[in-house]
Image (cartoon, rainbow, N blue to C red):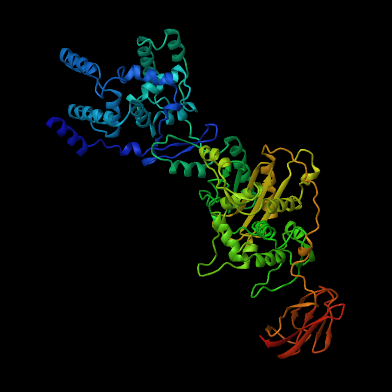
Amino acid sequence: MGVETAVFALDAAFPPDMSRALRSSPVALDRRGVWLRALPVEDGRWRIRADLDRTDPIFLKRLVAVEDARFWVHAGVDPISLLRAVGSAVVRGHPTSGASTLTMQTARLLEPRPRTLGAKLIEMVRATQIEARLSKREILALYLTLAPYGGNLEGVRAASLSYFGHEPETLTDGEQALLIALPQSPEVRRPDKRPEAARAARLAVLTKLIRARRLTEVEASEAESEPLPKRAAFPSLAWHVAGELARAAPASEASVVSTIDAGLQTRLEPLAAAAARAQGPENTAAILVVEIGGRAVRAAVGSGGLDRQGGWIDMTRAIRSPGSSLKPFIYGFAFDDGVAAPDTELDDAPRRFADYQPENFDRVFHGKVTAREALSHSLNVPAVELLDKVGPSTFEARMAAVDVTLVRPKKGLTAPGLAIALGGIGISLRDLATLYAALGDGGVVKPLAWTEAEAAKRPHQGGTRLMRTEAATQVLDILRETPPPAGVTAAALTKGRPLMAFKTGTSYGFRDAVAAGVVGRYVILVWTGRADGGARGGLTGRDSALPLLFDVADLLDAPAAAPRPIAPKSAPLALAHLDEISEGPRLIFPPDGSTVQVEGYGPRSRGLVLAAGGESLSWYVDGEPLDRDGVSGRVVWRPRGPGFYRLSVVDGEGRRAKARVRVKGG
């Protein structure tokens, strides 16, 4: 009893060092098991975790037969092999056979030491400790993770992929013999450096397999004739997300089966690279493709290539301005809350909201428009007006409730502002994909799935409702009516083309160009810009992101879809007009009681552009009529000097709005 206690105490005080095993990398695989990427460990070594379930079972049996025939029954040290080795050394005066078991070799790989008698004794002790802690399959997997195969290759998966171009799931007889031979003298037997030594070592293993009755002479002869391999580079597909998944994997996980479709990813990466090159040397691009049903991310292109400026940055995670791509959710919330309907009339006219005065992108106002027209043409003033009704704080809170993060541009801002409607907020492409997937799923938000295990659960999870199904459907119907980019035939008119609901966005200074689409069973998000957030010259979402969105859609297997039946377009009577004014015109600028600053006075001055809501308007200053500008058609007032003035605007029915304004010189 005392001896056992002492042994357990020593074992607990001096456990085997397993840290090297923990510093190994899993492999990120695509949905069908295609290798995407693994991560190197210290000193750039490829120590890839072995996965016995993805390793040729015949190879495993032959490895045990050659290296440690009684592996499955001994307790770390094989007494029969040990006695044979000692007896042979006594008779011949030097060792002629080894006694190292696979467990002892694993102990040596965990804690490398010079090959001395003392080191051998320590390996025996460590082997028994390892056997007490791990199962036989875990020990075999650990050996096949740590075994050296030449250069910076460690582990059978790294060796198989580098030398043979595939996982060790199926191996030829010659490949198996080479993989068994290499770990014993990896540098001396490297097939890419020393082919003759590699050939001789392979033949020696084939001979042992014949003796062990694991291979016939005919099979061995065929294996011997196999050409020796060269070394190839590792795959690096979906570089950003595959690396992210590999880093996050637990130490017990040898393979991470992602939701990425390697075939689609392979087609999209060159598309992003070409788009980035076409937009200038400092530009990059990002693409996300999400299957709506399980929220599985089928493609994730983080940049236009690692050779681009900032190409190592995953732009699907970066917080950038969405431009106008959040507008559909403003309209969706307005429809959801009963504030407006798709055919509620809105005013697209100059208007000031407290200290905020939005303009349309083309600086042209369209007067009376429906909500449907305002969204499909991405008009700014109606979107801001609806956000004012919904409430910026409410909008932000509804996003936070579904775990979508909106980042305000200035830390000091205590409340969100109306600039949200025009992209004055930060969001990641991943969160945008989450929102657009909700539009395609009846208004229900579910998190994106990055592994097949997550994707399998999503259809059975309830999710969080962002808006009613009716509101989401109305928004998608409107977005399907958006004019397509130049050179692309309208989807509804092209036989076989999927019907796309899409929206673009352009941030201030043309820094970010965004395009989002819902097509068939997929959601597509595209971004182009500079990784450092620098301004670009005139590249809009419609010009630089939307064509790429349609190119991506062409590569999907989304089924063709006929247009939805045309529903009645009349809004409910109570929502026919938004805040309809029943009495007279509305004076927008300058407002009553305001003080305005001018740069000069008189007929040669720049003047002030007056704005009001209403029809057939006439303007007066101190009772004197003002004429419209002959070029622009706008009413421009050029005060004669500083002081107080009385302004009035009269509509065609004689109704009047007045303002008293003070003018100051610059």
Q: Quadrant of residue 206?
A: top left
State the quadrant of the C terminus: bottom right
Please say if 419 is above or below 306.
below
Residue 173 in the image: state x and y as whole percent: 44, 17
User: How far across and how far down the image is residue 139, in percent?
Assistant: 33, 28
Give the percent coordinates (x, y) of residue 631: 83, 73
Q: How many marks?
A: 0
Q: Residue farthest to the top?
A: 217
Relative vertical location of residue 312 with respect to residue 584 in this rendering, above or below: above
Which residue occupies 35% across, 13% down?
Answer: 208
Q: Is residue 151 visible?
A: yes
Between 443 and 423, the residue placed more toward the observer is 443
Left or right position of 194 against 164? left
Image quarter (top left, top right, bottom left or bottom right) of the N terminus: top left
Residue 281: image location, x then y, percent: 59, 52
Question: Quick check: 396 above or below 185?
Answer: below
Give the residue displayed 45% in from the left and 11% down from the top.
219
Report whether residue 539 is seen.
Answer: no
Q: Is residue 460 left or right of residue 650?
A: left
Q: Quadrant of residue 149?
A: top left
